[in-house]
C-alpha cells in the first residue's frame, strides 16, 4: 500500500487537497502538511511520524518547490528506500499519483505522472493562434 503526503509552504497543500476531494473524493491514505503555519511549524516531525506509523507502506511525499525548505526537509526522509519525494507538484500530477494502480511500482507511477503532467503544461494562447491559422486556411 502507499501513503501520500502533500507538503507545501503555507496552505497550498490544503488548497490542492480541497480540490482533490471535490474531483475524486476524500483520500484516506493522504495527509496534508501545511508547513510553517500555526498548525505546523516544522514538517520533519510530521514526515517522521507518518513514516514510522506505516512501516510496510511506500510513502510518497509531494512538495511544492524544488530547493525550498519543505522539499529539503522531505529529502532528508529518502534515506529509507520506501520514501519517494516528488517536487514541483500540480493538481494533475497529484491526481495521477493518488489514483494510480497499487500493483504498479511506486517509481513507475511517479515517472508516468511526471511525464503526463509535463504534457498538461500548455501555453493556451498558442492554441488559439494555431486554431485561428487553421481557420484562415479554409
Image (tube, rainbow, N blue to C red):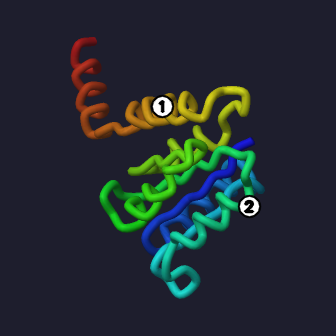
Residue 13: tell me if it is visible: yes
Residue at numbered disc 1 = 111
Residue furthest toward the front? 79
Quadrant of res 31: bottom right
Q: Nearer the viewer, mark 1 or mark 2?
A: 2
Label annotation for residue 55: none
Q: Which quadrant: the C terminus?
A: top left
Identify which residue is drawn at 48% across, 49% down: 85
Is residue 58 toward the left or the right of residue 115 in the image?
Answer: right
Query: Residue 61 at what x, y percent from top left?
Result: 54, 53
Q: Residue at x 39, y 50 (%)?
A: 88
* Residue 27 in view: no
**Disc 1 packing (10 Å; few <14; some 14–19; many ≥20):** few
Task: Compute the Cα span from label 1 to label 2.
Answer: 26 Å
* Frontmost residue, 85 versus 115: 85
Percent from the top left, x then y, of residue 46? 60, 70
Q: Secondary structure at mark 2?
A: helix
Write down the residue under mark 2.
Answer: 53
Mark 2 neighbour class, 10 Å CA radius: few under 14, some 14 to 19, many 20 or more: few
Image quarter where the N terminus lies is top right
Q: Nearer the viewer, residue 101 or 105?
A: 105
Q: For residue 33, what is the image quadrant?
A: bottom right
Amino acid at each position: 500500500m502507499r501513503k501520500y503526503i502533500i507538503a507545501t509552504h503555507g496552505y497550498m497543500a490544503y488548497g490542492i487537497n480541497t480540490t482533490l476531494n471535490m474531483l475524486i473524493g476524500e483520500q484516506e491514505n493522504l495527509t496534508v502538511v501545511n508547513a510553517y503555519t500555526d498548525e505546523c511549524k516544522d514538517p520533519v516531525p510530521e514526515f517522521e511520524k507518518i513514516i514510522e506509523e506505516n512501516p510496510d507502506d511506500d510513502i510518497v511525499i509531494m512538495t511544492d518547490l524544488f530547493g525550498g525548505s519543505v522539499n529539503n526537509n522531505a529529502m532528508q526522509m529518502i534515506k529509507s528506500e520506501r520514501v519517494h519525494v516528488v517536487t514541483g507538484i500540480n493538481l494533475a500530477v497529484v491526481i495521477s499519483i493518488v489514483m494510480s494502480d497499487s500493483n504498479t511500482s511506486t517509481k513507475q507511477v511517479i515517472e508516468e505522472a511526471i511525464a503526463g503532467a509535463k504534457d498538461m503544461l500548455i501555453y493556451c494562447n498558442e492554441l488559439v493562434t494555431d486554431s485561428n491559422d487553421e481557420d484562415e486556411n479554409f
